Structure formats: C-alpha cells, structure tokens
Amino acid sequence: MTQKSLPPLNWLRAFEVSARYLNFTHAAEELHLTQGAVSQQIRHLECQLGVALFKRLPRGLGLTEEGQSYLPVVQDAISRLAVGTNEIFGQRQRRPLKVRGSLSFLHFWLAPRLADFRRAHPQVDIRYISNLWVKELDAEDDLEIRWGSGQWAGVEAQRLTRDVLVPVCSPALIADAPLRDPRDLAGVPLLHVLGYEEGWGYWLERVGAEQVDSSSGLQFDTLVATLRMAELGLGVALARSSLVEDLLQEGRLVAPFTQRIEASESFYLVRGLGEALSSDAQAFSHWLVAMAHR
C-alpha cells in the first residue's frame, strides 16, 4: 500500500486554524496571511490528500467527515511539536551548559551534590549527556568528566579524584560467612565491570591472592549495574573509592578488606585545549573542582 507523503507544516497549520474558526478570514488574521493565501494552502492540502476537508456552506464553513477525523490528528501533532520545541530550546536565548561524562560519576558522585551548585547558580541550566565509552570531546560539549590516566591529546585535563580499588558487597552476603582474607573470594561470585584497565585480576595479584579465579562471576558494562548487583547480594564488586563513599556510610555496602590498592586512573574534568569557557562553564568548573578536593 502506497503511503501518502507528509504535507507541508504550513498547510497543516492553515487547516488547523481554519477548522477552529470555520472561517478563512479569521484564520488569516491569526496566521498573518491574506485570506487568499489561506484558501490556497487549504486547496493544496486537499489536492494532496485527495479529499475535501471543508464544506463550503452558504453562511460559512463546515468540516467534512474526513476533515473531522483529520483535525484531532493534526492538532495533536502540532501540539506535540510545540511542546517539544519549547522543552528543548526554551523561551530564553541562554543555552544550557553541556557536560558529557561517565554515567557512574553522575549517579554516585555528582547527583547527590548537584543541588549545592543549583542553589549557588540557579540561572545555569545543565544538560548532562552520559557516555559509556568516551573517546573524544564533542565540539558541542562545554565540559567532560572522563575516567582515565589524564593523558589525552587535544584537551586539558584537571584531576578530580584519587581513587583506591575497594572490594564491596552487601552486608547480608557475608553475614554467615565473613570474608577475612582476599583468598576467601574463591567462595563467592565476583562482579566484573567491563572497560576498566584494573579489574579483579589486577587486584588479586597485588594482594597475593592469585589462586582465586579472576575470570569467574558476572560481567556488566557499567559500574552502576555492577554496584547494584553487589547491593542486592549477588557477589563482590571491585569499586572505585570515590563512587562508594555514600553507599558505605549508609551501610548499603561494606568493604570487608583493609588492603589499599591505589588505582592508576581517576576522574578528570576535561575541556578542549585552549578553548575559552563561558561564564556558566567557569562557574561549574570552579564548583566541581572545589567540591572534589574537599
């Protein structure tokens, strides 16, 4: 079945306004067009659709059955377009601050602290775009929060965190069988997060527990999912200390071991090399760095 091509928006708008007023003159006034221009757009629309939408009556206009059926469809489409346009682009000329970054950093670190920035800078709207595997700064992004070594070409990177690799699990998981030594991990499932250079194999080797099978367990592509599984008691996750501070303080997770293995990677605030920051980006950068270094 051949589909009808979508009519131009101005034709649909002319139909919607004319159908509300049932009067081309009043429709022309709202649309800032001549009556003849409105009539012509209606004729073009009817010609494309192959049906009459209006009945020309002695004392005005009426809608045909096809026009009555089509009107709510057109009104809904125009309304959705108007709402979406206003939501994305707003009524102000001020553009939102675009920050791209780690989903886990947003979820565990930034979100609990963002109200502090909003209180200090209520005029700054933020659009945070999560990116699981960030490779380069998009030209439209103002700032980026990236996990890694801090050595990337074409950008300036300012360190935010200094992380320790921390095995964490639910208190319930070890209630009956405590984990006293890293070698005890052989008896529980390991939860892996993909994409990090230093995983379970690295940690187990550093603490002298190489005999534990570091390849066993469940694998996930985000730390958010991995820590959620740990919280639900499905195993032990290897977390980054900056992201689990609140979970540990709240008792939702526990860290059963005392060994401290520093991570070679950290979270960094990244910007384009030599690029000038807007006042909003400067305000957010200063706040973020100060908050991270507390």
Image (cartoon, rainbow, N blue to C red):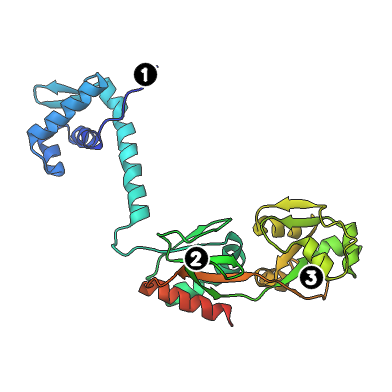
- Give the amino acid at mark 2: Glu
Quadrant hosting residue 161:
bottom right
Q: Quadrant of the N terminus?
A: top left
- Give the amino acid at mark 3: Ala
What's the mark number on residue 144?
2
On screen, residue 69 above or below 195: above
Q: Can residue 169 be seen at all in this image of the molecule?
A: no
Left or right position of 265 against 17: right
Viewer-nearest residue: 142 or 42:
142
Label 3 environment density (alpha carbons within 10 Å; few <14, some 14–19, many ≥20) = many
Precedes in sequence: disc 2 or disc 3 = 2
Precedes in sequence: disc 2 or disc 1 = 1
Precedes in sequence: disc 3 or disc 1 = 1
Q: Identify the residue position indicated by label 3 in the image.
A: 255
Left or right position of 226 against 292: right
Do the residues under discs 2 and 3 have CB atoms within 8 angstroms? no
Left or right position of 256 against 9: right
Residue 183: x and y, percent? Answer: 90, 65
Residue 249: x and y, percent? Answer: 71, 74
Q: Kindly identify the residue that appears in the image at 86 percent across and 63 percent down.
A: 174
Label 1 environment density (alpha carbons within 10 Å; few <14, some 14–19, many ≥20) = few
Viewer-nearest residue: 113 or 199:
199
Q: CA distance from mark 2 to mark 1?
A: 47 Å
Q: Kindly identify the residue that appears in the image at 32 percent across and 42 percent down.
A: 79
Q: CA distance from mark 2 to mark 3?
A: 30 Å
Q: Can residue 67 be seen at all in this image of the molecule?
A: yes
Do the residues under discs 2 and 1 have CB atoms within 8 angstroms? no
Left or right position of 174 against 293: right
Residue 88: x and y, percent? Answer: 37, 54
- Give the amino acid at mark 1: Thr
Q: Identify the residue position indicated by label 1 in the image.
A: 2
